[in-house]
Image (cartoon, grey):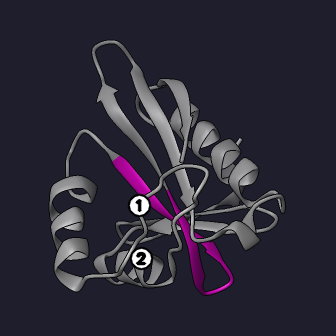
Amino acid sequence: MYGPKTMRGGNCMEIVGEKMVLRPYTLERCHEFYKAYVSDPAMTHDGYVYSQDTVDYYYRNKVMDQSRRYFAVCNGTRVIGEIQIKNIHADRSSGTLSIILADDSLKGQGFGTEAQRLVLDYSQCSRASYHLCRCCS
C-alpha cells in the first residue's frame, strides 16, 4: 500500500515509488509536461504543438475539475507524464484511471505500470475507495 511511501508537506502529497514519484499537478508541472509531449501516432493522427493558452485552459477546466484527481508522474525532477482518476462518483465509489506519458521513449520501462499501482493504492487508502476502470492514452 502507499502509506509508508507517502510524504506529506502541508497540503501537498507526494507518493513515492521505486522508479518515480507522483507529485501534485501544478500549473507549472502541466506546462513542463506539455512542452515535452510528443503525440503517439498509434493513438491519434493529429500532431501536437504546444500552446501556453491551450495548456492554461486545459489546467483550469480539466485539472481543477473537482470530479478528477491529477498527479504529475516524475522521474527525478522531470515531469514525464500525468495520471488521473476521472469521472469520480463518490456515491458509487467509482472512477476511471487515465495515464499519458510524454513520449514513446518512456514506454516499456515500467513508469506507467508503477504510476497506476501507486494511484490504485492511493485510492484504496484515501477517504473513499474507488472502483476504477483503466484507460491508457
> Where on the picture, by quarter, is residue 77?
bottom right
Badge 2 element = helix
Residue closer to the observer: 108 or 121: 108
Residue 34 in the image: state x and y as whole percent.
41, 76
In the displayed structure image, the side of residue 28 where residue 112 appears, left or right: right
In the displayed structure image, the side of residue 68 where residue 70 appears, left or right: right
Residue type at tag 2? Tyr
Which quarter of the rendering shows the N terminus?
A: top right
> What's drawn in magenta, residue-wise?
69-82
Q: Residue at x 15, y 68 (%)?
A: 57
In the displayed structure image, the side of residue 23 where residue 50 appears, left or right: left
In the displayed structure image, the side of residue 62 where residue 105 appears, left or right: right
For label 1, the residue is: 46
- Disc marking residue 34: 2
Residue 88 in the image: state x and y as whole percent.
32, 30
> Where on the picture, by quarter, is residue 89?
top left
- Any magenta on residue 128? no
- Any magenta on residue 77? yes
Q: Main secondary structure of the magenta part?
A: strand
Badge 1 element = loop
